[in-house]
Amino acid sequence: MSKCRGEAAAGAAGILLRYLQEQNRPYSAQDVFGNLQREHGLGKAVVVKTLEQLAQQGKIKEKMYGKQKIYFADQDPFDMVSDADLQGLDGKIVALTAKVQSLQQSCRYMEAELKELSSALTTPEMQKEIQELKKECAGYRERLKNIKAATNRVTPEEKEQVYRERQKYCKEWRKRKRMATELSDAILEGYPKSKKQFFEEVGIETDEDYNVTLPDP
């Protein structure tokens, strides 16, 4: 039984040591547990105890950050990086950043195109729409045919006559309304009450009372 526990502890130590070396950045025990629990099924107590043991053995480094312990890989095994290497890495970072931005822009274009295509009609839907439009056009042609065949159509001369009469009556309407307005305004100059009271007493009804307006000339 103790042998199995020892193998499990060694396995956990190898997993945690390899993880910290690969990531090469500081983590709390909670961070390590959260990152590896799903993949490796390590319990939190095992993670905490194993990290402490690795730190005691000098295989990883441990520092206090406030009230929390932070663990990170021992930096001694890593090669020293020269200024030239750092500049080269900076150049790669700039190039990769530009590439990422370009890819993100391409993704936005493709997303917009996909959205446009998704909202477009499919071939069956387009065919159905065409059939409905053809049916609608056929109905309009039939109505036009019936109108042309009708014997009670209004001739251009009759239409012009109706238009002239309309202008005549509207002109007379406008004239009489102006005369009535001028007459009532003259009376109201010496009338002791309001215009509304005068109209009510005399029994005058206006176009406005019935929401009627004069047509345009």
Image (spheres, rainbow, N blue to C red):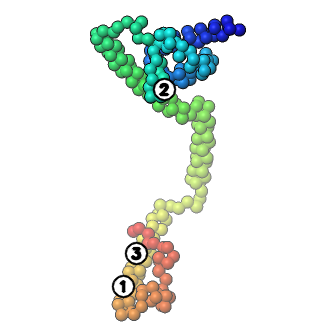
Q: CA distance from mark 2 to mark 3?
A: 94 Å
In the image, residue 42 sits, relative to residue 126, either above or below, namely above
Sort mark 3 into few (<14), some (14-19) or many (20+) by Cα contacts within 10 Å.
some
Residue placed farthest to the front in the image? 56
Q: Is residue 145 visible?
A: no
Give residue 171's mark.
3
Q: Position of residue 162 (x, y in %)?
A: 48, 68
Classify 20 as above or below 67. above
The quarter of the picture where the N terminus appears is: top right
Q: Is residue 52 left or right of residue 139?
A: left
Q: Quadrant of residue 214?
A: bottom left
Determine which residue is flagged by label 1. 182
Q: Secondary structure at mark 3?
A: helix
Above-or-below relation of 115 to 136: above
Q: Residue at x 37, y 6 (%)?
A: 79
Which percent across, then down, holds residue 108? Answer: 44, 28
Name which of mark 3 and mark 1 comes first in the sequence: 3
Residue 212's spot in the image, x, y percent?
48, 73
Q: Secondary structure at mark 1?
A: helix
- Tell me the distance, in whole angstroms, between the alpha carbons under discs 2 and 1: 94 Å
**Which tag is nearer the camera, tag 2 or tag 1?**
2
